[in-house]
Image: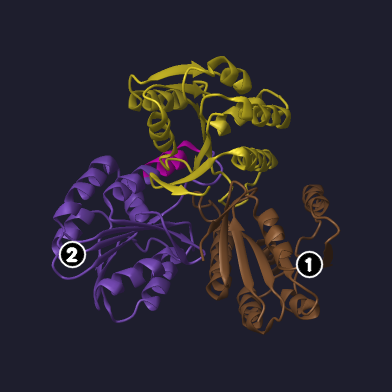
Chain colours: A purple, B yellow, C brown
Amino acid sequence: MGRIILVTGGARSGKSAIAEARALSLAPRAIYIATAEPRDAEMTARIAAHQARRGGNWRTHAEPLDLTGALAATDGQGPRLVDCLTLWLTNLMLGGYDWQAAGRALVAALPAQADPVIFVTNEVGAGIVPDNVLAREFRDAAGTLNQWVAAVADEVTLAVAGLPLKVK
Amino acid sequence: MGRIILVTGGARSGKSAIAEARALSLAPRAIYIATAEPRDAEMTARIAAHQARRGGNWRTHAEPLDLTGALAATDGQGPRLVDCLTLWLTNLMLGGYDWQAAGRALVAALPAQADPVIFVTNEVGAGIVPDNVLAREFRDAAGTLNQWVAAVADEVTLAVAGLPLKVK
Amino acid sequence: MGRIILVTGGARSGKSAIAEARALSLAPRAIYIATAEPRDAEMTARIAAHQARRGGNWRTHAEPLDLTGALAATDGQGPRLVDCLTLWLTNLMLGGYDWQAAGRALVAALPAQADPVIFVTNEVGAGIVPDNVLAREFRDAAGTLNQWVAAVADEVTLAVAGLPLKVK
């Protein structure tokens, strides 16, 4: 069974770079499963900056919604880095999908993976309680999804100022 | 003297579940001191979800304000889990009470406890500085109260994605 | 070369007190480089509270913008505590300065320091994504600056409820 790894952290905590280094420590080439959709100029710039940092060792597979399908389609081709769970959750919620069903299906598919999967996710619950109910629902959903993946992960790392802090 | 334990973490970080497991590792039955008040439907649903997860090993003692009195009333009956300090602080501040005096009295009462006390609390200070002064005051008060309890605690744990990270 | 130390944490996580204790563990007297400007009553009160906690072992050097110059001016006089990087970044951004150039110059000046430098900074990226673009830009800049300093630091500590958690 492929190793399951979760790298979590706040915004600009260096979690993507830590996850990329971990993926390339497992194999010389890896697959980048991008959940981001370039909806506006700010997001497009973030995606471009991430792509520029990654070099030629990566093949990109874009999939905003069917993450379980993307893992099935890429298994056997090397380590997969999913960046990130929080954007996937955003896509599911904005699209009106059942994120709990999708999340449970994803977690259920992990034991069957032959190749490793490294998930990047965000810490979003350590600020003041948001004013609006949608932000609170998203925050709760993100924390729940992180717990589900962390429970079955072989490694969990918290990124702090670009450095990895071992949690599991 | 009963062991004093603090479990902190962001929203949906799994801190309550970690604290409950720790309480039941100390004794087969424990007391749940609930500081939450079911003020609206969202809070009522959260309380119900927490109660559903806890099983028959728990007796609930509801106390939104006089936490020091609740500890005195329940000492000698087994481990007490206080969930949570942040809601207690909210209740004190919304009610116009002197939270600093109440907090100091709580901390002063801890060395005399015969049975363990496990506190759940929230990390609320790791986001962007809030726009309004009341949110900043609450954030500062919550952080200060956490420091006071952590200073006298025998164990302090940070919950990350449902997993415990040992701080003290 | 003087030791480079970074202490990060959320609001009221006890990071300043941890950094001050670390500075005084290196020498009996130290220099406090204050980046705060007393722009309003709330900030003036925070500065006064910080000064009251520090005792007579400290000499204060106020510098809101030219941090690299402040380090050059104070080197050879003992450990320097910079409190804090996040306010320095705020001052740079509000003043219309190039924070990236200033940050890179600061990091480039660190290897030449004869005396230790202890930086205090804030975790600001672990809450919900802020509504407005300026807050997101600040959050990204703060996280980036923290990573730059952490990468060259000899020690990095995360403050949680007043307690130090070793990251590096």
What amino acid does circle 2 point to? Asp
> In front: A140, or A133?
A140
SS of the residue under disc 1: strand
Report the residue marked by disc 1.
C30
Residue at image x 44%, y 49%?
B165
Residue at image x 83%, y 61%?
C57
Q: Identify the subunit bearing mark 2.
A: A
* A19 in relation to C15, above or below: below
Residue at image x 70%, y 42%?
B133
Residue at image x 18%, y 64%?
A115
Q: Is residue A139 magenta?
A: yes
Q: Position of residue B148 (x, y in %)?
A: 65, 39
> In front: C6, or C102?
C6
Report the residue marked by disc 2.
A115
Relative to residue C44, is residue C135 drawn left or right? left
Q: Position of residue B50 (x, y in %)?
A: 39, 27
Bounds of the magenta segment: A132-141
Give the quarter of the image for residue C110.
bottom right
- Outermost residue to the top: B73
* A58 in relation to C140, above or below: below
Give the quarter of the image for residue C67.
bottom right
Q: State the predominant SS element of the stretch in magenta.
A: helix
